[in-house]
Image: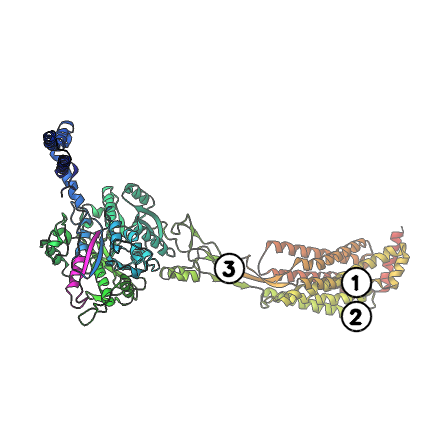
């Protein structure tokens, strides 16, 4: 019985071995006596006696002599005391091994091991507390007349983490007649286990759950919160009475949003629970303004000093710790020891209600600690049950008493230690046992004070009924589960570690039905002495500045002022803080948005203004003056035409071109039509008429002057040298043929150009940021031909007129034409220069003025001098005067 005592202090092992040698010696002697009869029997008897004596001397005393002589360090009180303490710790791992007697159904309860510490209370007390709550729930159910009447529940508490007791015991419990047949249908395996409660951690549930899922044995966890268990395809018979990590993460993110914290660190335990929390957190903040600046998995080998240095280097003020109690406790103590101060710590439900940490020395130095936890529901009567069970004397063997249903090995913890443990999971544990009981109650068709004794209940029957019917009320709480086996009840509290060392409730988070999140900010005493701490990578940009992101985090950016013609939409930016989806549907609030073509903005604007549309209206002073000038031109041409018609047969009119003068005057009047279309809002029609009349009819004017210049040169110079050419020209009216051909060519060029690419109205938005200049978009390809043809006529006219510069003074039309052409060229050179230097709405006025100037140059400098002679110098308008000029010129050139 003492074989399991400490090795070097285990006298029982030595005594047992000596006794075995003694027994073997006398069995051998007895066998020899039976087989041999002779004189040596006394010698054999004496040898057996001597061997019996030596067995104790050699195997009991000599090892102790060896220790005293050769290993004196093992012969001290301290060494032996250490062996005793180690043994005490070892046997404390095997707690509450419950043996079932006289029960109808068995619940398999899986717990974690615990260890003894010198701190009170601590995690050492947690698991014993939960086990006692389980026992209390079973005791209540067995004593109930409403739930499972005439049915008794038994239970077995199993230490999941013991290396020698883990899977062998699980397999044994799943076996039928000590056999496990994994390929049988679930209902063919009648295991003695009806349901499983536990274990505590998500990793431990993942390790054993598949074994129970195979036979659809109901497994109810009171603390495994990993979101993976919500996948019913993988865990069809799994149920839990604690909320999924998703709910806790939602609560933590709500805290971050409430205080506008966007630059955070996430420290999680390096296990399934912590990794699941990290994955959920990263998914939750994906479309928010929260950035995960730093993440770290924590285990027993983590260098906390290096972790804190990295957090400090990134200027992170908010630290989320998603880890079990003992991992968080080690982290917080390291922060105190390493003087890692002035941070906001956000705890999950695993450690936010820790009883020990808020009271340790130096906890205020690390900053402010807030957390989120399920609202604790006190289980009445459980503490009295624990005190009562500890005072009760349990039998050492179940066979000693038919009423004894357990063998109980007490741990070294006191009753006060167990009662003072963290009660966070008491209600989930309590509910887990009741969930199985209610499912069994439904499966057994219990009612009217009795259950159906004639039916066999298989685990899968309890499992299938659980999801549909196991809704009940417990301690005034309506217990319901959703289709994933997750609890559909309860709420979370937001807590703050106050200066009294207590976790004070400062807010509430409800998520069933309507979501409601509330925090009473006035109850929080920040380490910043009143002001809410901030945690940002980059400060918000001033109004009118856009964010230029630097690196991979959307929280890190540089601010750049929006240039002219763009803006930052602060309306969308404000709406973004309350409705993130609005950003995706409208505009990105963190970039410069270009104004529309009809709008403008100055640098650093938050909105756009409508541009001022500019064009030359008919009411403009300049437009009125130019149009009056055009009408005056028409009047002058009409007056000149009348005067020339009256004096048609006079030498001045004949020398000016005779009938050709009327064609020139008419074309000058028609050219003035273009001037009127440079005013008013431009349209396609007005843009066409700005150029078409002038280009077409001015071509006729220039063709007339080309012919007129050519005729003057022919009469006085070419006629004498080329009489036949002169005769042909006069016979076939060459002047009218040239004019007609020039008109036809220009008309054809204009038709082709305007057909391929007609002028269109355009809005010039490039000249001025705050204005739109309306004008006409003239395609150079469509106007190049007509313009070049017009320039060619002008060049020919200039050449012919220059050749006649030596003709008689009063008959020299060539000089007048040359001067008019020079004015025409200077006019358009001036306009082209102005067009390149000035860009604005007055360009149409300048263009119209250039056209009007071109028309007036011929009217004033070609026709008005002749009108002056006709009216005021009639003596120079006679045949004799002109004949005398010709004779004098003939004599001069003949010399």
Can residue 499 be seen here? The reply is no
Magenta region: which residues? 133-158
Secondary element under disc 3, as helix, strand or loop, is: loop
Dot 2: what SS?
helix
Residue at the farthest bottom position: 448
Quadrant in the picture for residue 809 = bottom right
The residue that label 3 is drawn on is 770
- Distance from disc 1 to disc 3, alpha carbons, whole Å, reads 49 Å
Q: Residue at x 32, y 53 (%)?
A: 277
Q: Which residue is mark 1?
A: 741
Q: Quadrant of residue 878?
A: bottom right
Residue 531 drawn at (x, y percent): 26, 53
Side (left or right) of 573 relative to 504: right
Tell me: 159 left or right of 282: left
Indicate which disc, 1 or 3, sits on the residue closer to the N terminus.
Answer: 1
The residue sitting at 32% across, 49% down in the picture is: 265
Residue 61: quarter of image:
top left
Disc nearer the start of the sequence (1/2): 2
Front-lying residue, 478 or 386: 386
Report which residue position mark 2 lands on: 645
- Magenta span contains residue 755: no
Closer-to-camera residue (368/439): 439
* Mark earlier in primary sequence (3, 2): 2
* Residue at image location 15% in from the left, 59% down from the top: 382
Q: Position of residue 483 (x, y in %)?
A: 32, 64
Residue 454 numbered tag? none
Residue 480 rendering spot, x and y as whole percentages:
26, 65
């Amino acid at each position: 019985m003492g074989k399991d005592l400490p090795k070097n202090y285990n006298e029982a092992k030595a005594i047992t071995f000596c006794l075995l040698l003694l027994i073997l010696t006398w069995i051998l002697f007895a066998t020899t006596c039976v087989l041999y009869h002779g004189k040596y029997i006394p010698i054999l008897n004496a040898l057996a006696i001597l061997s019996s004596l030596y067995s104790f001397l050699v195997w009991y005393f000599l090892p102790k002599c060896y220790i005293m002589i050769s290993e004196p360090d093992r012969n001290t009180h301290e060494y032996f005391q250490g062996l005793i303490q180690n043994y005490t710790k070892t046997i404390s791992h095997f707690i509450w091994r419950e043996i079932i007697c006289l029960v109808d159904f068995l619940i398999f309860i899986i717990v974690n091991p615990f260890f003894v510490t010198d701190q009170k209370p601590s995690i050492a007390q947690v698991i014993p507390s939960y086990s006692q709550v389980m026992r209390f729930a079973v005791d209540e159910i067995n004593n109930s007349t409403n739930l499972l009447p005439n049915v008794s529940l038994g239970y077995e508490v199993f230490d999941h983490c013991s290396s020698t007791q883990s899977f062998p015991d699980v397999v044994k419990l799943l076996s039928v007649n000590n056999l496990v047949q994994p390929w049988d249908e679930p209902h063919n395996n009648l295991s003695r286990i009806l349901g499983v409660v536990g274990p505590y951690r998500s990793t431990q549930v993942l390790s054993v759950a598949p074994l129970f899922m195979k036979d659809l044995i109901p497994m109810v966890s009171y603390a495994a919160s990993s979101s993976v268990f919500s996948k019913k395809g993988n865990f069809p018979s799994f149920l839990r009475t604690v909320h999924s990590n998703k709910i806790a993460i939602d609560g933590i993110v709500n805290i971050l949003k409430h205080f506008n914290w966007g630059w955070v660190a996430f420290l999680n335990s390096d296990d399934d629970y912590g990794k699941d929390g990290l994955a959920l957190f990263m998914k939750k903040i994906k479309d928010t303004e929260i950035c995960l600046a730093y993440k770290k998995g924590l285990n027993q080998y983590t260098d906390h000093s290096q972790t804190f240095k990295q957090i400090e280097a990134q200027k992170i003020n908010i630290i989320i710790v998603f880890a079990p109690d003992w991992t968080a406790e080690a982290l917080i103590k390291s922060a105190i020891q390493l003087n890692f101060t002035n941070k906001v710590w956000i705890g999950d439900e695993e450690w936010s209600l820790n009883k020990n940490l808020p009271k340790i020395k130096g906890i205020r130095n690390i900053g402010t600690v807030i957390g989120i936890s399920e609202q604790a529901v006190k289980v009445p009567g459980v503490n009295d049950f624990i005190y009562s069970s500890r005072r009760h004397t349990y039998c050492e063997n179940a066979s000693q008493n038919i009423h004894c249903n357990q063998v109980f090995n007490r741990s070294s913890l006191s009753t006060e230690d167990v009662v003072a443990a963290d009660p966070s999971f008491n209600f989930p544990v309590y509910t887990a046992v009741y969930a199985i009981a209610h499912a069994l109650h439904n499966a057994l068709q219990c009612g009217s004070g009795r259950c159906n004794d004639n039916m066999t209940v298989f685990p899968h029957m309890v499992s299938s009924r659980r999801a549909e019917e196991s809704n009940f009320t417990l301690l005034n709480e309506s217990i319901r589960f959703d289709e994933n086996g997750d609890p559909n009840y309860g709420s979370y509290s937001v807590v703050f570690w106050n200066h009294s060392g207590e976790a004070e409730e400062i807010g509430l988070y409800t998520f069933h039905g309507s979501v409601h999140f509330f925090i009473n900010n006035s109850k929080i005493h920040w380490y910043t002495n009143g002001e809410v701490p901030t945690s940002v990578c980059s400060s918000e940009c001033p109004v009118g500045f856009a964010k230029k992101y630097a690196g991979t985090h959307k929280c890190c950016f540089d601010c750049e002022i929006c240039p002219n013609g763009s803006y930052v939409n602060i309306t969308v930016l404000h709406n973004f803080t309350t409705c993130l989806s609005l950003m995706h549907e409208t505009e990105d609030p963190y970039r410069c948005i270009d104004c529309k073509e009809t709008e403008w903005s100055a640098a650093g604007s938050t909105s756009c203004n409508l541009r001022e549309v500019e064009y030359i209206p008919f009411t403009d002073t300049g437009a009125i003056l130019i149009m009056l000038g055009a009408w005056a031109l028409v009047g002058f041409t009409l007056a000149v035409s009348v005067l020339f018609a009256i004096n048609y047969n006079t030498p001045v009119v004949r020398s000016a071109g005779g009938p050709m003068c009327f064609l020139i005057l008419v074309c000058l009047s028609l050219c003035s039509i273009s001037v009127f279309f440079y005013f008013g809002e431009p349209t396609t029609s007005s843009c066409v008429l700005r150029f078409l009349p002038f280009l077409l009819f001015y071509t006729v004017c220039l063709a007339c002057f080309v012919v007129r210049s050519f005729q003057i040169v022919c009469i006085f110079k070419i006629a004498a040298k080329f009489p036949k050419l002169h005769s042909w020209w006069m016979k076939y009216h060459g002047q009218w043929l040239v004019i007609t051909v020039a008109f036809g060519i220009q008309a054809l060029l204009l038709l082709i150009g305007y057909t391929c690419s007609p002028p269109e109205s355009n809005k010039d938005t490039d000249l001025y940021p705050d204005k739109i200049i309306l004008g006409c978009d003239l395609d150079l390809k469509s106007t190049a031909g007509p313009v070049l043809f017009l320039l060619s006529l002008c060049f020919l006219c200039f050449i012919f007129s220059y050749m006649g510069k030596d003709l008689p003074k009063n008959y020299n039309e060539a000089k007048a034409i040359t001067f008019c052409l020079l004015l025409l060229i200077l006019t358009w050179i001036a306009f082209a220069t102005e067009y390149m230097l000035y860009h604005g709405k007055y360009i149409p006025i300048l263009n119209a003025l250039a056209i009007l100037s071109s028309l007036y140059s011929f009217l004033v400098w070609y026709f008005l001098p002749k009108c002056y002679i006709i009216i005021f110098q009639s003596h120079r308008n006679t045949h004799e005067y002109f004949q005398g000029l010709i004779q004098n010129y003939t004599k001069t050139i003949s010399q």
